[in-house]
Amino acid sequence: MTLSTNLADLPYKDTSLDDRPGECWDDIPGLDGLYQVSNFGRIKRLERLMYDVLGRPHTFPCIIKAPQVNRDRNMLMKDWTLRLQTTIQVENRTYHFQVARLVYYCFIDKFNMDDANLIITTKNGNGLDIRQENLALLTYTQKNHRSYDIGRQKSHFQTNKQKLMEILQVSLMKSRKVVSQYDKDGKFIATFKSIMEAARITAINHSSISYAVRHYMCTAGGYYWREGDADKINKKEIQDHQVKRWSSYRQKKGKPITQLDLQGNVLASYVAKSLASKITGIPHRAISQNIQGLVGNAGGYIWRAGNLLEIGNIGVQTYQLNDIEINGRKIELSDCRKRDIADRGDYSRAVKVTKFTPNGTPVACYNTLKSAADSVQRCYQIIASAIQGKPRVIAGYIWRRGDQMNINIDVSTIAGSPKKGRPSSKSRKSLV
């Protein structure tokens, strides 16, 4: 398609604020007072006052916004079908318009702009010539029939059927993927000639199957899918890939922390708090509170932000690879929790906790943090934070680590407990 390069013949390229002869303007639907379109297809941004996040005023001047030229290849004619489109952003919201639709709506006749079945086309076939006398409103079906009538599209009925079937078969052979279905244990179930066949037989969405084939860890319909016809898949490879992905995320997003003993000696460094919590068994929240200075220690250790191993102490253990490999050795969480287990027990599960009234009288002893938390309908992390650092009242009770049923405690220094010589608010109510 040969296009003229004369500026007068291409109004959409004219960015001058001066009106062209016979040009008139109208507001773009939904953007009244902000943007306008002319009967020549030019887009104008009107001058307006805006305020930034600091409240400072900024004046946006009036400008002519040049549209983009979109091109679609016509393989039969070996040329391009062109159309003008504009993108407008107002208050962090983006609008996309075809300029021909705007000109027809504003200057010829109103129609449903949201109806994709209504197509605005040009009578002379030049998509850049969007003068109002050159525009026509067609349905999608009419537009397709017009393409056949003017010879820009060839009907498949005019093609040799045998040749057409050969072309389709070659296309299918190139695009078709043999896929196999496996259960969650990696055992083979069935093989299908294509993803569409698998979707038709299993009633699982073909897009979900395609996604599962391309992404190693994902499933579709509760099954793993792989390209080819292997008799099984290695489930351990999937787990290792998942661990590697999580570890990579921790290394990119995590904030390193360092573990010290109560004397200030560096013990270990972790790439993220979540990894430190998982390996040591100390609640994530307790470690965070110690780093923030809200409690004296967490799980019998001092925690500091950053990797203090970078300063010195090269021989100290560092946990910076991932959850499975530490210093090149395969480990399990049980190996990590054996450290100091004789002194402090399993912090997250096998910790005895004693509950006291606000007056210091023992009430009950629990064998685990969870059972203690369930007695007052709280999460165990809250009870864990209550038995370390500065004592305080949680859920109306004082909490102590270990079995202390045979002693009373001094409540004068407990945060949140009733002050001596002054009844609590509940007691004052009962006296009234």
Image (cartoon, rainbow, N blue to C red):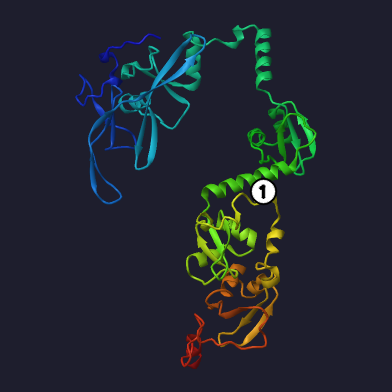
> Compared with residue 168, is residue 346 higher up or lower down, i.e. above or below?
below
Between residue 175 and residue 155, name the one nearer to us: 175
Q: Residues within 10 Å of mark 1 (few under 14, many from 20)?
A: few
> Compared with residue 10, is residue 25 higher up or lower down, i.e. above or below?
below
Q: Which residue is mark 1?
A: 328
Which of the 4 image quarters holds residue 32? top left
Question: Which residue is painted at 57% across and 10% down in the image?
Answer: 155
Q: Is residue 262 visible?
A: yes
> Compared with residue 59, is residue 402 higher up or lower down, i.e. above or below?
below
- Residue 413, image x and y in percent? 50, 84
Q: Is residue 285 visible?
A: no
- Residue 65, image x and y in percent? 29, 28
Question: Which residue is painted at 26% across and 51% down in the image?
Answer: 55
- Residue 399, image x and y in percent? 60, 79
- Residue 396, image x and y in percent? 56, 80
Question: Which residue is painted at 74% across and 29% down in the image?
Answer: 228
Between residue 398 and residue 341, name the one nearer to us: 341
Count the labels in the image.
Answer: 1
Question: Which residue is painted at 26% across and 21% down in the image?
Answer: 14
Which amino acid type is shown beneath numbered disc 1?
Gly
Q: Which quadrant would the N terminus be assigned to in this image?
A: top left
Left or right: residue 17 compared with residue 274: left
Between residue 228 and residue 287, name the one nearer to us: 287
Between residue 421 and residue 72, name the one nearer to us: 421
Left or right: residue 173 compared with residue 76: right
As helix, strand or loop, the secondary structure at mark 1 comes to loop
